[in-house]
Image (cartoon, rainbow, N blue to C red):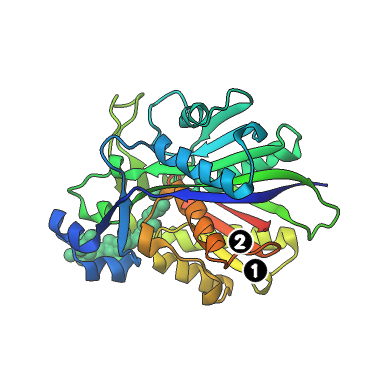
Amino acid sequence: MIRSVVRGTGSFLPERVLSNDEMAKLVDTSDEWIVQRTGIERRHIAADGETTSDLATEAARRALQDADLDIADIDMIVLATSTPDNTFPATAVAVQNRLGMHHGAAYDLQAVCSGFVFALSNADAQIRCNHAKRILVIGAETFSRILDWTDRTTCVLFGDGAGSVVLEAADVDDTNGRGIITSHLRSDGAHKSKLYVDGGPSTTQTVGHLRMEGREVFKHAVGMVTDVVEDAFDAAGIDADDVDWFVPHQANKRIIDASAKKLGIAADKVVLTVQDHGNTSAASIPLALDVACRDGRIKQNDLVLLEAMGGGFTWGSVLVRW
Ligand code: ACO
C-alpha cells in the first residue's frame, strides 16, 4: 500500500511583529479584549513589497533542508493560498521558479483557512495515484493585504506567514504504519456570505477586503470541525485517546478549546500557536506543525490529527501517522 509520509517541515514568518497594544493604536480595541475573545497576543505582518511567494519560498527551502532533500527530488508543488501574488499565474509557479525547479508541476489550491487540509489531501491523492513521488505542500498567506484596517471586528484577528511539508511516497504494509491514514473534506456554499472578500477580478475588478460575521462563523465552527474529525476517527477505527497531537487551524483559542473538549482530546495534546501568529489562514496548520516538530513535541510514529474550517464554508480533517 502506498502512503504519503511526512519527510520534513519548514516555516517562515515576516520579521515585523504587531502586538495587541500597537493594534489598539490603530483601531478602538484593547489587548484585554483580543486575548480574552481570541487568545491572540501578537501577529507577524509582511513588509512593504514582501509577497506570499517570498514567504512560501523560504518555508519550502526550510522544509527541503529538514527533509535533507534537494529541489531536484521534488516532482510537484501544491500551494494553498487565498492571497496570491497575482490573480494569475499561480503563486506556486513563482515558488517553483524561485526554487530553480523547471520540471514537474506546480499549482495553487484555494479553500481559505481549510486550504492546507485540502492541499494535503489533494497531494496525498496525487502520491497514491503514482502521479508524484515527492510533493512540497505549502500554505502561505499575506492576509494583512486584504484586511480593512479600520474594521476592528476583523483586522485584529489575522496575520501573515507560511508553512510547508514534504510528502514522500512510501510502501507501507501495515495499516497502522506511517503516513496519511485518512482525510475528509467538506464545503457548503450556502454560508458564502458569512466570510468572504468583497472584491475580485470578475466582480469588482479589485482585490477587495475581508468581511466576516464573526458570531455566525463561531456558531458553526465547533460543530463542523468535530463532525469531520469524527469521520476521520470512524474511518481509521480510532478514538480521541489514540491521538498524540491535535493540530487545529489556529483561528481562535475559544474555538480550539471547545472543539478539543467536545472531541474528548486532552488540553496537553493540543498544539497552540494562535497567541503568536494570529489567524494565518492556510498557513496556520503547517506553521504549527513546524513549531511542534522543531521543539520536539511531534515525533516519528506519533498520531497527529489536523482539522480546519474556513470561508465557503469549507472544512476538513487529516489523520497522519508522523
Ligand atoms: N475590540 C473591542 N471590541 C470589539 C472588537 C475589538 N477588536 N471587535 C468587536 N468588538 C465588540 C463588538 O462591537 C461588540 O460590541 P457590542 O456588544 O457593543 O455590539 C462586542 O465586542 C462583542 O462582539 P461579538 O462579535 O459578539 O464578539 P464575540 O465574542 O463573538 O467575538 C470574534 C468576536 C472574536 C470575531 C468571534 O466571533 C470569533 O472568533 N468568530 C470566529 C471567527 C473566525 O474564527 N474566523 C476565521 C475563520 S477562518 C477563515 O476562513 C478566514
Q: Amino acid at mark 1?
A: Val
What residue sits 63% from the left and 69% below the top?
Answer: 244
Q: Eyeballing the image, is 199 above or below 219? A: above
Name which of mark 1 and mark 2 comes first in the sequence: 1
Foreground residue among 19 and 236: 19
Does dot 2 land on a helix, a strand or a loop?
Answer: strand
Determine whether label 1 and label 2 are within 8 Å by CB: yes
Q: Is residue 291 left or right of residue 233?
A: left
Which residue is tagged 2?
A: 305
Is residue 121 among what the camera can see?
A: yes
Q: Residues within 10 Å of mark 2 (few under 14, many from 20)?
A: many
The part of the image, by quadrant, that contains residue 250 is: bottom left
Foreground residue among 115 and 225: 115
Q: Quadrant of the C terminus?
A: bottom right
Is residue 188 among what the camera can see?
A: no
Q: Residues within 10 Å of mark 1 (few under 14, many from 20)?
A: some
The location of residue 272, given as percent across then percent down, is: 46, 66
Q: Tell which residue pokes out farthest to the right in this image.
A: 173
- As measured in the structure, the alpha-carbon distance from the residue carrying label 1 to the one carrying label 2 is 7 Å
Does dot 1 land on a helix, a strand or a loop?
Answer: loop
Q: Which mark is residue 243?
A: 1
The location of residue 190, given as percent across then percent down, is: 45, 44
Q: Eyeballing the image, is 3 above or below 201? A: below
Foreground residue among 110 and 288: 288
Q: Which mark is residue 49?
A: none
Q: Is residue 37 left or right of residue 260?
A: left
Q: Is residue 211 left or right of residue 223?
A: left
What residue sits 64% from the left and 71% below the top?
Answer: 240
Foreground residue among 218 and 271: 271
Q: Quick check: is the Cβ at mark 2 less than 8 Å away from ligand 1?
A: no
What residue sits 79% from the left and 61% below the top?
Answer: 176
Q: Is residue 152 left or right of residue 213?
A: left
